Image (cartoon, rainbow, N blue to C red):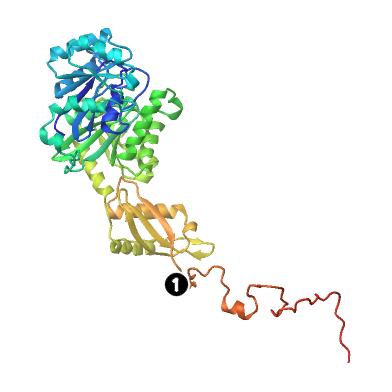
């Protein structure tokens, strides 16, 4: 990507819809309610052979510097300063408003290069608003429809001068090609536990909006970062409340975006509030990440406000081991996003969990462990018969997935499965990650094998015994054909006398 494009404008003019159109997928949340976007969202935009970095911003709105509107405005100003060109989006149907004129003056004072985009102009509906935009004195406005994909050719012509010649002529280049795949790390948890503050502390800048108001984050915001020369993609997510409390349509979209992010990442950092006992919703969020097979790490935030630290840490560890038995030994990192205490220990714990999540055990080592485990604690009797575990192998990693071949897979008690999983965890260093263990019934070598395509064909013994399929007329008990016209005998047969 050769240059950066920022999408700016007042609320509810279609900036996020245009962002989704340029990146080619629905990444940003869109809704009829104004002010959905609050943080900067970055993506890889493309129009034909032209590739660029595109930034979606919050709606331009004035307010007190410490208010939510003021914090959103600082994020937008930062995006304008970091970009090579700004797409100033207006509503072509509504025309030019006082807010558009005010922020056009702001763009002129900033010295940014601006392309005016009149959105919602499908079918020529916003032509009058496009012509009205000439009064802004920011160049010729471009009529587009982000929802329908109209006007992208004119937008390409307007953005092409900002790209190097090699970028505009290389039709085969793919964005991000040749780059190392980053570690995808999501920060999840209940609202107002410090997820955004933790992300800002990790990267060392105010990248996402933070404040005392719960539910500030709505989109899942991805930030590219490097930790000790390793590429990491940090994703801040919206807080997950109890399902019964999620009523508003916009919050449902935010929750769906967070759940989609959990399924797409590799490691999840579950943020808990150390100043209060863990709630049921905390464990629901953690269990969701474990059930999805992600590599979990617990960040115990607000550690600076805890007084009796040793007892609190011991209690949290006990509760986690009891409630998250499927990820026993999960790594717990006490930290404070406000002061930075304990934050440097978070990424080493993340990398340790990630390595365990990718562990592959050799089949020979696995079966030697199985032999020792069976000698120490054989499977219980089921129906008076011994269950036989023949051998094991690992099917996949991320998370580790094992399969054991067994004589009666459906009859093995769950307690013995937990015994096997705990043994795998202790022996091969799989603490703190989910382990999947399934059973398959092994083939019996003494059972006669079915011949493919033999369904419906009589055996030779059946043919010899007269059990072959009757092709015409009727047969007696001996299999001989009765002469045509012969009647079936009726009544009782008389005994023959000499």
In the rendered image, residue 471, in percent from the top left (x then y), is placed at 65, 72
In the rendered image, residue 303, in percent from the top left (x then y), is placed at 25, 29
Above or below 13: residue 271? below
Give the SS element for disc 1.
loop
Looking at the image, the residue that sits furthest to the top is 98
Residue 290 image-quadrant placement:
top left
In this rendering, does residue 124 appear at all? yes
Whether residue 18 sits left or right of residue 496 in the image: it is left
Disc 1 crowd rating (10 Å Cα; few below 14, some 14-19, many 20+) is few
In the rendered image, residue 274, in percent from the top left (x then y), is placed at 30, 29
Looking at the image, the residue that sits furthest to the bottom is 498
Give the residue displayed 34% in from the left and 44% down from the top: 293
Above or below 7: residue 469? below
Along the line of sight, the residue nearer the viewer: 113 or 319: 113
Give the residue displayed 42% in from the left and 24% down from the top: 249
Residue at the spot of label 1? 445
């Amino acid at each position: 990507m050769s240059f950066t494009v920022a999408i700016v404008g007042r609320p509810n003019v279609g900036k996020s819809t245009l962002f989704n159109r340029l990146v080619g997928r629905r990444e940003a949340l869109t809704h009829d309610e104004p002010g959905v976007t609050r943080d900067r969202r970055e993506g890889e935009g493309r129009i034909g052979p032209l590739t660029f970095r595109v930034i979606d911003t919050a709606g331009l709105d004035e307010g007190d510097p410490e208010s939510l509107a003021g914090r959103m405005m600082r994020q937008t100003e930062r995006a304008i300063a970091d970009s090579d060109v700004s797409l100033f989006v207006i509503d072509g149907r509504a025309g030019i408003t006082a807010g558009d004129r005010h922020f056009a003056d702001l763009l002129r004072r900033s010295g940014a290069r601006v392309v005016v985009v009149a959105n919602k102009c499908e079918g020529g509906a916003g032509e009058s608003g496009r012509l009205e935009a000439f009064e802004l004195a920011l160049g010729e406005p471009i009529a587009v429809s982000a929802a329908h994909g109209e006007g992208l050719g004119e937008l390409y012509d307007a953005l092409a001068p900002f790209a190097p010649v090699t970028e505009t002529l290389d039709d085969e280049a793919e964005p991000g090609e040749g780059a190392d795949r980053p570690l995808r790390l999501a920060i999840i948890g209940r609202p107002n536990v410090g997820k955004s503050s933790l992300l800002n502390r990790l990267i060392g800048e105010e990248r996402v909006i933070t404040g005392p108001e719960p539910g500030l984050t709505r989109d899942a915001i991805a930030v590219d970062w490097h930790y000790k020369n390793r590429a990491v993609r940090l994703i801040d997510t919206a807080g997950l409340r109890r399902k019964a409390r999620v009523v508003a349509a916009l919050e449902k979209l935010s929750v769906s975006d967070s759940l989609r992010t959990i399924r797409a990442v590799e490691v999840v950092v579950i943020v808990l509030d150390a100043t209060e006992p863990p709630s049921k919703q905390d464990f629901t969020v953690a269990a969701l990440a474990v059930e999805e097979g992600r590599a979990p790490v617990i960040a115990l935030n607000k550690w600076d406000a805890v007084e009796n630290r040793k007892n609190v840490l011991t209690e949290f560890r006990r509760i986690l081991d009891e409630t998250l038995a499927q990820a026993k030994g999960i790594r717990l990192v006490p930290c404070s996003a406000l002061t930075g205490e304990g934050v440097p220990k978070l990424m080493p714990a993340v990398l340790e969990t990630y390595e365990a999540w990718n562990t592959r055990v050799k089949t020979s080592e696995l079966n030697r462990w199985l032999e020792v485990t069976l000698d120490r604690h054989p499977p219980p009797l089921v129906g008076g018969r011994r269950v036989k575990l023949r051998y094991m192998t690992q099917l996949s990693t991320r998370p580790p997935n094992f399969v054991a071949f067994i004589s009666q897979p459906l009859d093995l008690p769950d307690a013995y499965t937990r015994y096997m999983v705990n043994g795998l965890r202790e022996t091969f260093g799989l603490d703190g990650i989910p382990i999947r263990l399934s059973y398959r019934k092994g083939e019996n070598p003494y059972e006669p094998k079915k011949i493919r395509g033999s369904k419906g064909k009589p055996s030779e013994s059946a043919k010899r015994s007269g059990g072959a399929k009757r092709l015409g007329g009727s047969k007696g008990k001996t299999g001989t054909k009765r002469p045509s016209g012969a009647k079936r005998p009726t009544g009782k047969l008389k005994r023959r006398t000499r």
